[in-house]
Image (cartoon, rainbow, N blue to C red):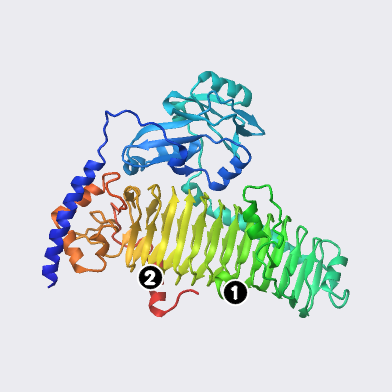
Amino acid sequence: MRSTDTRRWQFVTVACVAFLLVASVGSFVVDLGSARPDPVAYDETVKLGLSAEVEQTAEHAGASIPRVEVFYSQYEYVVGYTGVGQAIAALDDPGRERQFGYPLAVYASDYAGRSPRCVGGTLVTATNPDWAPVTEMRFVIGSDARVAGDQVVVPFSSSSDAADFAADCGGRIVDWDGLRRDPPSVTGATDVASAVDDRRDAADRRTATARRLLDREVSVVVGRDAPTIRAAVRTAPPDTTVVVPPGTYAERVVVNRSITLRGEGATLSGGGNGTVVDVRADDVAVTGFTIRGVGNATRSADGSGDGSGDWDAQIQRGYGGGDAGVVARNVSGVYVRNVTVHTPANGVLLRRTPGTVVEGVAVNGTAEWADGFMGVIAMNAPVVVQDSVIDGGRDGVYLHRAGGTVVRNNTFRGQRFGVHLMYTSDTLVADNVARGQVSSGLVVMTRPSGNAIVGNDVRHANGGIFVGGAHSYVADNVVADTDRGLVSYATQTTFEHNVLYGNGVGFAVSTVVPSNRVVDNDFVANDRHATAGAGALRLFTHEGRGNYWEGAYDPTPGDGPTLDRAYAPTDPIDRRLHRTDAAVTLRSAPTVRAIRSFRGTTPGFRRGSIVDTAPLARPANPATLARVRNETGTGGDRS
């Protein structure tokens, strides 16, 4: 019976792939004699470039950001880039031609005749620019115009207009070839990978500074020198410690001076009304408390809040005005350590609190995620959240415009999301454990850039790690026993040394722009190793090295590190290799081998397709894989 089924499958599949070969080659033929395509509106492009936060902040301030759009020979979409430097980095990428083909036309924003000026370091213009071909333009570089601290390259189709702008705003003028020879620097995934240790070190230094707040001398002991905690705070000199002995204190406390509030097994009860500890001074430490009786408000009662003039004012009011065990706003250097919070709303809420460290905290939120809110929420400034355990509630750690934050060595259980990044770039999310999330263990949204997600362990959740944005680094993570392990709607991001084990889908690729680097990952025991949505061919290979796919079949194995033929996890035959013997037999058919060879070298050959042209013969991360296999087999899961 199996032999008959195999022959029938061979006949049908060979006929289908032969048809696809003819049809697909025809659909991607480029008419070299055709006229250059006309530019399109930027809103009609697939957008890459600056992060959404940078773009929206700049535009809210009235800034104009030059853009570029590129028509590629083997890509059906027009790709738009926010920032000229971002476009050049993409055009110069070594894998660009194989993924997209060559550029048929490149247009840039034309500021000629638009009276551009530099106002306070911001590029402003009287009217929006049109498009012009880059080969006919001059570019002003090194002017006073900046976006998020980086220089803005300003294009002009008129040499005289470029000269006038340079005379007013500084800088020098180059043509397109000159700009390509000496392009502006752009931070990429490789830079993010090399900065991981620096981010760890910065968090270590911030933590060391915060811990010094615990060394302050004792000035007031509650019950001996003052009748209540509030009275003790009012009388304590700055830079001293208030000690709260064991017991339950029905108080809500405002800390409005730079002191350390140290509980010695004390419980604070807020009576179910509002925030329990409200920090309103710099360099405050809160340690050694159990906090109960937090109010259940998840936003400001009157809808008010600072940031009312910002583009994201509604988000700030909706997320940053609720009740919490500990709240700190518009202060710096706060340290929250060894505090347990039982809350129907937030555990620790931080807004504009640079230099703050949350360490060794336990937050017990609601059993139903929709009924609660955030374990730790940080907005508008970088913080460190480490060595903490958050159970229940909506999100374990929620970050909004908190670029530069470090979230490490925490455990998250039973939320919607374990870690949730919104408009937050340049962040390190490392060595966390997530279990039982309703949606995903870690999720990165709203087009940030420069994030590093490394060494995390996500299991027994509906989703694993969902990554959006660009120029990020996702490495050394374990995702096991989820519906979807890694989900990428990111661009220009590196995924390496991850172990995807026992998931419904190991890696789901959603972006239509195939610009990521995926290498040295291990795909084992997944129902489907990888899937892809609409878009051109995705190559999961870099510099002759790919990934390990359990079941990838090589009838003539050698001693080298890679197999001698490509593997396509989205192919109807290849994706069954680790599950059926018939697929192994059919894969060796000469026609099927030919189609795979062609597909691995032709950009844009199939929609929704992933090909690894150099699959690994052995796991890339054997020690990690062995540990995961052992823990799965014995019921252990590092929880």
Frontmost residue, 544 versus 149: 149
Q: Amino acid at mark 2?
A: Ala
Quadrant hosting residue 149: top right
Q: Residues within 10 Å of mark 1 (few under 14, many from 20)?
A: many
Name, please, the residue furthest toward the front.
302
Instruction: Name the residue carrying label 1.
Output: 366
Q: Which mark is residue 298?
A: none
Disc with the residue nearer the chain's start (2 vs 1):
1
Q: Which mark is residue 626?
A: 2
- Left or right, 353 with reference to 462: right
Residue 305 visible to the viewer: yes
- Left or right, 544 with reference to 21: right
**557 above or below 3?**
above
User: Where is residue 250 drawn, in percent x and y?
Assistant: 78, 77
Frontmost residue, 410 versus 43: 43
User: Where is residue 204 drawn, in percent x and y?
Assistant: 62, 59
Badge 2 marks a residue whose secondary structure is helix
Q: Amino acid at mark 1?
A: Thr
Give the residue drawn at x 44%, y 30%: 181
**89 above or below 609?**
above
Badge 1 marks a residue whose secondary structure is loop
**626 above or below 573?**
below
- Left or right, 601 with reference to 427: left
User: Where is residue 571 drawn, in percent x and y?
Assistant: 26, 57
Give the residue drawn at x 24%, y 64%: 577
